[in-house]
Image (cartoon, rainbow, N blue to C red):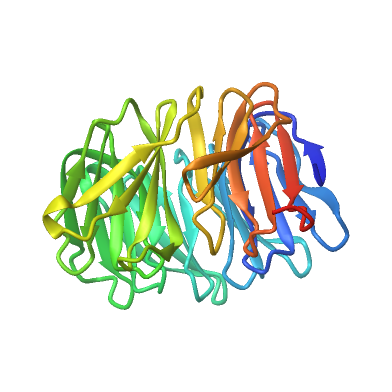
């Protein structure tokens, strides 16, 4: 264990800045915590209150942190001054999805059936996108910032980020969709559907290929940021109490093949590939963070949240792993360079 602190309730989200010098965590009690890598110390940007904070993320340059939750207020702090610089109030709304553009200081966040895009430089809203079919269950920027995808009833809508007024493209799903994950090159999008299957489509045609047989709710999808010999990344799926890994096959007619990581787990809450590798981390309700070598072989078991883990995130350089606990624990492990 490299460092640990405790919030007063379930850790709902954690996020590293892209520069890796800051870690943020938030809780069901409404707290927002910042950990500074160089000083190895933490402090609260926001104390506990009457409502939960459910999502947070840093801007691409680490200049801003945005957080939203049950009270419908999007709060944005400057990381230079550590001061609150904006509070966007949205009465009777619950903000549970937000994401910063990957190369400019624009943040997208959910407001019921709509997505609002807010520019931190001009301090103004620049677009409001109507999903229409339902509330928004998932949201993700294209890795190059060209598109914004949002999911809900009947699938995914994908807007052109250069022309918000254009009619969005659709990835149509018979049921409803939740988690969204873009491959690092932006060529593919994976979507978790509420009838326990996933769809993978190329951005070029948005024709979904479906994969089912998963044992329960699919909580998380994660692509590796490097490719297999075929030139396509691996896709990991957290479904019920298992972690599955999918690999594109050379034979186009064979599609994707997969395997299940062999371990006796309770509900898996989060998964993430270590940057630059096929090594995978999983966090589950049984209080275990497991590290899987090459997304196949269990190599290490980490503990520290007796009531179970809720989320995890790799440091951008891959040398640290942070996790949040269902009892409020925030933990960071650091790689021992003396070991393989």
Q: Can residue 58 be seen? A: yes
Q: Quadrant of residue 122?
A: bottom right
Taking 122 as reference, is 108 left or right?
left
Residue occupying the point 67% across, 49% down: 321
Residue occupying the point 80% across, 59% down: 37
Q: Can residue 52 be seen? A: no
Percent position of residue 110, x then y: 41, 50
Percent position of residue 287, x then y: 64, 26
Residue occupying the point 70% across, 22% down: 306
Percent position of residue 184, x then y: 41, 66
Foreground of the two, 61 or 239: 239
Q: Quadrant of residue 5?
A: top right
Foreground of the two, 296 or 48: 296
Residue occupying the point 29% across, 62% down: 188
Q: Quadrant of residue 49?
A: top right
Taking 45 as reference, is 145 left or right?
left
Taking 214 as reference, is 111 left or right?
right
């Amino acid at each position: 264990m490299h460092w640990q602190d405790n919030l007063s309730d379930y850790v709902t989200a954690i996020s590293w800045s892209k520069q890796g010098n800051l870690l943020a965590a938030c809780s069901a009690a409404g707290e927002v915590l910042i950990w500074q890598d160089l000083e190895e110390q933490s402090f609260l940007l926001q104390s506990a209150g009457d409502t939960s904070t459910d999502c947070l993320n840093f801007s691409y340059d680490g200049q801003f942190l945005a957080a939203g939750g049950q009270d419908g207020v999007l709060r944005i702090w400057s990381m230079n001054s550590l001061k609150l610089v904006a509070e966007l109030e949205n009465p009777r709304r619950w903000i549970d999805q937000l994401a910063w553009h990957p190369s400019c200081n624009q943040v997208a966040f959910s407001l019921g059936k709509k997505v609002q895009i807010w520019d931190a430089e001009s301090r103004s809203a620049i677009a409001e996108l109507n999903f229409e079919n339902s509330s928004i269950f998932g949201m993700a920027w294209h890795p190059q910032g060209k598109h914004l995808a949002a999911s809900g009833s009947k699938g995914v809508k994908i807007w052109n980020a250069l022309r918000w007024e254009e009619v969005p493209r659709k990835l149509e799903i018979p049921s409803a969709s939740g988690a969204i994950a873009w491959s690092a090159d932006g060529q593919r999008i994976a979507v978790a559907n509420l009838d326990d299957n996933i769809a993978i489509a190329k951005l070029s045609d948005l024709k979904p290929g479906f994969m089912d047989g998963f044992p329960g709710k699919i909580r998380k999808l994660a692509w590796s940021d490097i490719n297999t010999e075929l030139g396509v990344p691996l896709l990991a799926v957290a479904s019920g109490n298992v972690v599955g890994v999918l690999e594109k096959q050379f034979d186009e007619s064979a599609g994707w093949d997969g395997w299940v990581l062999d371990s006796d787990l309770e509900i898996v809450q989060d998964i993430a590939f270590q940057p630059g590798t096929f090594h995978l981390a999983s966090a589950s309700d049984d209080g275990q963070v497991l590290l899987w070598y090459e997304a196949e072989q269990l190599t290490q078991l980490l503990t520290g949240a007796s009531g179970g883990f809720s989320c995890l995130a790799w440091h951008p350089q891959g040398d640290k792993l942070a996790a949040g606990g269902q009892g409020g624990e925030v933990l960071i492990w650091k790689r021992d360079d003396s070991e393989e």
